[in-house]
Image: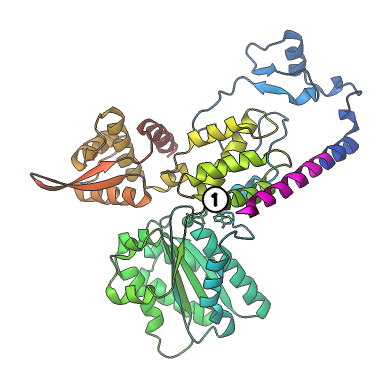
Amino acid sequence: MDKPRSAMHTWNASSQSSQAAARSEERRRVPWRSKKTPLMPFISVKYLQVVFKGTDQGGGVRKTHFHPPLHRQYVRTDIKHKSGAEGLQRGGGPVSRHRSVFIDEGVLDLNYVPPRLLHRDAELRFLNGLFRFVIEAPYEMSQRAVIFGGVGSGKTALAQRFGLNLKEEAGRRRVKAEYIHVNCRESRGSLFIVLQRVMRRLRPQFPDRGFSANELLDTLMRILDEDDLHLVLCLDEVDALIEKEGSDAIYNLSRVQEERLEGPRRLSLILIAKEPEAFKGLDRSTLSTLQRNVVRMPEYTVPQLADIVISRAEAAYRAGAISPGIVDFIGELAASENGDARYAIDLLWRAGKYADTAYSREVLPEHVRKAAASLFPALRPEEIRQLSRHEQFALLGIARHFRHSPEPHATTGEAETSYQVVCEEYGEKARGHTQFWKYLNRLKGTGAISTVLRASKKGRTQLISLPKVPAEDLERELIRIVDQG
Ligand SMILES: Nc1ncnc2c1ncn2[C@@H]1O[C@H](COP(=O)(O)OP(=O)(O)O)[C@@H](O)[C@H]1O
Ligand SMILES: [Mg+2]
């Protein structure tokens, strides 16, 4: 419990000293920025107009402060301050010469794998132990493991960190081992697409078409033989794969290895899902082999989240641009979202973007609040983008329905009618009832909607609700994404 505090103070002290060092370094390198040197030659005509008129009518620049450094302190009035997530884009800086609060925004990218995972030592050790044979005796066995945990509990980061470490160790010891991480939801739950992505990693020129999933699987094993390689394949969000392909996909992946009684072992699996329920569609024997090696990821606590946020902030932010108080605030907000580290890091990034948009030199509580208001933890814009177009239509229909409905629940029939109206609006043919059910299942799988079964006179009906997402915000976000195509 003490650890985050002390870590935070150390960090703060070093931030301040490095900030001072950065300032003096800047003065040394850029002498014309000293107060005595006139700024005139470096000021644009636009800026002069602003200074002399006081305000600018149409052009969009308004001066706010007369304190040095003069040339940085203005705000563009033609950029509306966005209250939602719109307008925030990864990469790129603010429009003026304002110095961004970030030094390396990439560290806050969703796909960034931190060099060190905090508070997951035991889990990483467990995985290392299970797969030690890959380094020591790669051809003698194959392994399967499962990682369970809520959103933002670090499942993906754990698996990827494990994979990178494994590859490094294999490289050092000259063992031929490979780790490939594939997200099944991004692969639309299709074993074929999953395997195609794997093939591309091993053989970048591998053709797109002409193979069935089973042929791809056989080809994969052949390539592993050819390369004399042991592959640890991680199937992230494997529930999407099971949802779409049933038991078969996992069964087939296990089978290819088990059928080779002779010869070296080539393929090990790591499966990632939110909860064990994802596996309930599997047959018993596949299930029992999976249940042996399970890593459960507990929710992060407030101090743990603060540690994670601090270490990421140190790498992403300019020294002094974010204070320990703000880091704590972000940790608290994320803890109230079930210890979701992804939410914490998203907040950390968005808060910085709002600080930049406001031309602030540091992140203020208001920027964090704005960031929090623009994020609905139950569903992220990135996740909406991963839905198919018709799944987006279905969700848009549901959002519209709830925006006008006084009831907290909708029937499947109501949702389907709204979906048909949306399709009509976008000039596309609505898909049939069976397909619509599949969309609902997928939306449920991503956490975009919740469903409950209610007994009624007609039998059991499924009722739909929107968890924690204001229908209006969801609608706005969806329209934006659908319009972008
Ligand atoms: N223990 C940790 N140390 C450092 N960063 C972490 C840790 N756990 C999660 N993160 C970061 O939090 C974000 C969400 O983690 P992720 O692994 O994507 O969660 P999940 O896959 O369980 O939803 C990622 O940016 C990840 O790098
Ligand atoms: Mg994940």
In-image side of 325 versus 272 (left or right): right
Query: Is residue 206 visible to the viewer in this orientation of the structure?
Result: no
Q: Magenta region, mostly helix, strand or loop? A: helix
Q: Which residues are magenta?
A: 1-20
SS at badge 1: loop
- The residue that appears at 87% across and 38% down in the rendered structure is 24
Q: Residue furthest top?
A: 53
In the figure, residue 196 lies in which quadrant? bottom left
Query: Is residue 368 visible to the viewer in this orientation of the structure?
Result: yes
Residue with the mark numbered 1? 110
- The residue that appears at 40% across and 56% down in the rendered structure is 185
Q: Identity of the amino acid at label 1?
A: Leu
Q: Confirm if mark 1 falls within 8 A of ligand 1.
A: yes
Looking at the picture, does residue 483 appear above or below residue 380?
above
In the figure, residue 81 lies in which quadrant? top right
- The residue that appears at 50% across and 33% down in the rendered structure is 86
Expressed as whole percent of the image width and height from the top left, the position of residue 482 reads 40, 38
Query: In terms of depth relative to the viewer, which is nearer, 329 or 170?
Result: 329
